[in-house]
Every structure is written in structure tokens, then in C-alpha cells.
Amino acid sequence: MIYVIINIGIAAYLAWSSFNVNTKNMRNENSLINIVLLSAATAILTVVTMLMVMWGPERFTVFLEHVLLFLIALIYIVIGFYFLGNAVKVGKIVSFLKIASILAALWISASKIQVADYTRFVFESKVLVQGDLAQFFPMTWLQLYFGLFIFVLPGLGALILMLSAENVNSRQAFQRALLFAASLVFAWISSAALSYISEMLPMMISLYTGVLAITVTFLTRISVQDKIYDTLTLFSNFIVNVIKYAVPSFVAALFFVGLRPIHSRAPVLYTVVVFAIACAAVFGARLLAAAITKISTFRSSSYGAAFEGDLASIDYNDETSDICNKLFEIFQNRANVGEMKVLIAGGNNELNTVFASRGAKPTLSAVDPGLEAIREQGINVFMKNEADGIFALQQKTAEINSFFKATGAEVLIILNEGRHLVGVIALGEKRGGASYDEYDMQIFDKLYSYFFVFGYYMSNIANASVVGTVNREIRMSAQIITSIQENMDPVDNPKMDVGYLMVPAHNIGGEFVDLIRLTDTRHIFVTGALSGKGISASMSMVILKSIIRTYLNSTHDFKKLVAKVNQFIRFSLPKGTFFAGVFCLMDFETDTLYYVNCGIPAMLLYTRAYNNVIEIQGNGYVLGFVKDITPLLKVKQIKLSAGDVIAISTAGLINSHSLRGEQYGKDRIKKSMTDNYMYSGMRMCAFLFDDLKRFMAKELDDDITVTMIRYLDKDSQTVSDEEDSDNGSSDNN
């Protein structure tokens, strides 16, 4: 009964497979689906036949066994012609040969082979020729059946497929043909082993449906496989799969057969022992395979999680050369990359090679037409020869191929800061000659933020022209940090006047304000503070400012933008980094300010109509602590009227203390807003800071960052201009 249960499971799997075949990119999909359907039908019929052996009439059971014999031959015939259909164009001659083979199999299995023992699936037949010729040609019809339909036809199809792949000089096609042939060889060897075992345990022959199930699984997966493996990877995958599947199967079968004599005396004990041994063999094999895959040679090709972990472990306090070598080592170990170049955009529209794992270090144009064509499509990760499949790039194929040739690359990872080119990571061929596939491209695209951090570091922090050489810990001067902090888009709209103040307690810090123009009628304001002090926080700040602008190229949903920034802080900036601030989106057409509070401690609104200041920030969650902050984000909105003023401040201003230990607090900010609402945003910030200095009467303990947003009418704009005539407008600062 155990064989019936096993075959029911195999039949269920094959039936499920017949409805769930992945036909994407499949060649000759109809033939392959027919193979799956025939295998499923064979497994189902095997279960029925075994039940008939136990409880059905003999003649009907014999008939079913003849049908099974024909179905097995039919499966191998279809497999052989499936291979042939992948190698040559199927014409009338091939179709005629296929039909002739099927008819021959039907005739031989129905009339030339007899069932010797229907209870054990034993077949017999006479020799092909009678009389004296039988001495020279003793082959039987049964031997002809196996030799012609199981070995010759499918084997010939596999051979023609390999020769065809070799002639077209396609490594991918040849590898697929080789794997198809390997699947066929597996089926042959497994069937022979099963036949040998069935001499001791006759009913084991019924498990040939398992061989069909494994073979069909191999064929369907290979048919959609576009990845090219090098010899080492194929060998390592073979070893790992042998350990995971073949070894426990062999151990279980060995004890299943070896302990068979005790079955008659203690069937329950026999079943328990064999089951326990099988489970132990499977568990032990899995542990052994997992241990082996930790060795670099045997690592799984699904390397995404490990790759991300390695990228996150890069220490940017190391020397530049060490960081580059570390990145290359990660690409080697995880993605099997054989060569890498890093090109960073410099002055005079040049791309300078700052790292090359081997070979020359070319200097290329940062406005190369091939590179520019790719960038215009908003593509960050691009594979060689991919232009042929993108209509907009087909006219630029020659220029794109020229750039790939100049860099010696197979894949380009293009690092963009908004519309500005930061650099390019050029990946050469994989070791062993394997090619990059869709999985590689998905992983590179998913981990793009890590590569951007590396490129931005190389461009702005490791660049020799801006790096201090006196002290290794001081990577960038305060002047450069300040220039990046103040690199923002002025608000050029008569409805609004924006002022800001950024005063670090120790020359440089992680607090910042950014103004980003989207359109003539929409502007984004970001104010906040990254955790940490000094150079480390300032590095994270300039990188975060750049990544926000980069995300805006592809993200048009305000809430999703904040969620993506949270993920970037969580996974790409140093561990433990968080951001407390606010994202604001101003729509001048509707006079509406949308905002997401990300832990900003103070967001105050002055309304001229009531001459009063209220808090509007509500509850918010800092970015960087959770993987997905989307469920916690709330987009709020406020309608602005002429004369309204919004003040946004980080914790440094509120928490500042006087010599007596008194906290500056929010009430003093509110009073300053009420007293100075008629002045420009810059003047309001200046008045507030002057009041703070008088209050403290000592040096700053913390960074101070304030943003003032004034909504204007004609009269208030005139007053603001008169008051600021000596200092210039806020837009010019």
C-alpha cells in the first residue's frame, strides 16, 4: 500500500505541475507542456493499475499495463522530438518521423510485448527474427522497445541539439543543450537503478513515476533558464544538490532494502526505523549542504541577502584604496565579477578612472553620447547589448557599445545625483566566462543606494582636491560642507518668502535645510537633523540631501518619497543613524502646504488674522528606526493665507539653556514670530538667533537650524523688501 500512497503523491505533483508550468521565455512550450501532461497521466494511470492489481480483474489490469508501456515510450519520443525542435526547424519530414515513431511504439507495446506477471509489472517478448538468424541477431522486441524509444530517439535529439548550439556559437544555447542531455542521462541511470532494485523488491518498479517527475521538473526549469553558469558554478551546484537530494535518497533506499527481512516479523518497527533514518538523512544532508555553501566556491547563486550585508559592512573611515578594494572583493565573492572600474565625474566634463582592478585607467567624457542616451531614459543599471530591446535607444546602439568598449564593461551602474552625474561603476566579465542575468540586474538595481553612497563618497569626500591631508579623521573642510548645505533651489514665487538659519555648534554638523523646486507651482522644503556630530554626521547629511533629489526623479508620490528616504537611512547610512525633521510640499496653485512630520520638535504657525501662534506638527516618527515606516506616516495639510508664517526648528534651539539653566523653549519662538512677522524670512531668523545669543550669553551647545516660511500678499511683500533692502532678499542668500 505504501507504493500506492507514494504514487498518489507523485501523481498529484505532476498534475499540479501540468497546470503551473512557467511558459515565460519557454521554447516549444506546447511540446514541453505535452510532456508534463503525459507524465501526469502516466502517474495517475499507475495508481489506478496498482489498485487493479489488488482488487481488479486480471484482463483489465493487463490492458492498463500495456497502455502504461505505450505512455512511457510516448513520453521519451516527445522528449526526443522536443530536443530536435529546439535544434532545427520542424518541417513535414520531422513531423512524419514523429508520427511514425508513435505508431511504431503503439504497435510494439500492444502486440509484440506480453505481460509475464501483471502483479509485479513484469514484461517479456520474443526475438525479432526466428530460425538461424536468431543466433546472430538475438535482440528481443522488448529490448528494441527500450533501445529505440528510451535511448536512441531522445539521445539522438539531444546530440543534434548540442551540435546545433555549437554551430551557432551560443554559450547559452550550448549550456541549455548540455543540461537537457544531463537530464536525459539522469533519467536513464535512475531507471536502470530502479530496474536493478526491483529484482529484489518487485514493486519498486512502480516508482518510475518519480523518475518522470524529476526529469520533467529538470526539463521545465532548464527551458526557461537564461542564466549562463561557469564550469565551477555548475560543478559546485551539482555537488550541493547531490548532497541535498541524492545522498539522503540513497541512504533511505539502502536501509529500506537492507532492513526488509525484519518487515515480516515486526512491520511497525520496520516502518518507524526506516522513516526515522530517512528523516535523519534528509536533515543531516541539509545541514551538510548549508555548511558547504558557506565556502566561497560552493556559494549559492542567490546571493542578494549576503551581498547586501557585505555592502552595509563597508567602513568609510578606511583609506580610499581599501574601500575600493573592499567593494571589488564583495562583487567578486558574491556576484563572481572578474573586473571592476570606478569612474568619477570631475571638472571639464571628464570621467576619471579612480580605481581599476586591472588594466588601464582611461579618462572619458562625462557627456559621452552613449552614456547620455542611457541616462536620458532614467536607467541606473544597464547591461551590454540591452539597447537592442529598448526602442528609444536603438538609434544610439553604436555610441552605447563604444562606451562599453572604452570601459571594458558588461554592466554599468550609473550614479546620478538628480540630473548631475556622480560617476559610473563599470563591471567587467564574470569569472569563468559566465554572463550577467536578470537576477544580477535585479540585485544591482535593488542595492543601488549602497553604490550611490560609495560613488558620492568617492566624488565628494575621497577626491584628492577636497580632502584634508593633515589629519586622517578630517575628510572634508567646513567650507565644502557649508557649500553643499547651502546648495538649494531658491523659491522664485511672489506668494512666498523663505528664510533659513543653519549654525553648527562645532563648525560642521548633520543638520540641514533643503529647498527643492519641482515645478513653477510646487516646491519641497526639508528641514531636520541627522543623529551624530562632526564629520560623520556631515557626511551623512550631504549624502542624504543628494539621495532625496535622486529619488525625486522617479518617485512622484509624496508619502512614498519619505518612505524611501527612511529605507535609505536604515540600510545605507551608518548603523544607528536617524533623522528628525519634516518634509513639506507647497502647492502654490491651491495655497496648500502638505507636510509629513518625521519627529520635528517644533512646527509653529502664526496667523495674522488672529495675531496668534499655534503648534501644528502633531505626532511624528523619526526616520531610520524601522524597515518600513509607511503605515506610520501621515500626510497633513494646511491652507495658507496672506500674512501667515510657519517656523520650523530642530531641537537645538528649543533645548538651549541660559547660564541659570533656564530652557529657551517654544514660547520665546512664538513671541519672536509675533513681534517680527512683518519682516523677511531671513530677518526673522536673524532676530530669533540674536535673541538666543542674548538669552544664552555663552557658546552654543548644539546645532541650531530654523526655517521661516512667510506667505505673502502685495502689501507684506512691499514691507519685507523695504526692511531687507540692506541685506538682500531671502532668495539671494
Image (tube, helix red, strand yellow):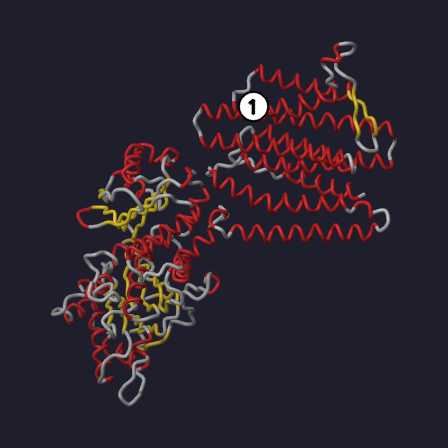
Residue that protrudes farthest toward the bottom in the picture: 660
Residue 189, horizontal then vertical, whole percent: 65, 33
The answer, for residue 7, to whether it is visible in the render is yes
Residue 240, horizontal then vertical, whole percent: 56, 45
Residue at horizontal 52 percent and vertical 21 percent from the top: 88
In the picture provided, is 219 more to the left or to the right than 469?
right
The answer, for residue 378, to whether it is visible in the render is no
Residue 388, horizontal then vertical, whole percent: 37, 33
Q: Quadrant of residue 113?
A: top right
Residue that protrudes farthest toward the front in the picture: 135
Screen quadrant of the N terminus: top right
In the picture provided, is 723 more to the left or to the right than 462?
left
Residue designated by label 1: 84
Residue 359, horizontal then vertical, whole percent: 28, 42
Residue at horizontal 37 percent and vertical 55 percent from the top: 450
Q: In the image shown, does 417 or 113 lie closer to the viewer?
A: 113
Answer few, some or many: residues within 10 Å of disc 1's Cα (few below 14, many 20 plus, some between 14 and 19).
many
Q: In the image shown, does 125 or 667 lie closer to the viewer?
A: 125
Q: Please, what is the three-letter code of the amino acid marked with disc 1? A: Leu
Q: In the image shown, does 624 or 76 lie closer to the viewer?
A: 76
Q: Quadrant of residue 719?
A: bottom left
Q: In the image shown, does 274 or 440 lie closer to the viewer?
A: 274
604 versus 356 height, above or below: below
Q: Secondary structure at mark 1?
A: helix
Residue at horizontal 71 percent and vertical 22 percent from the top: 145
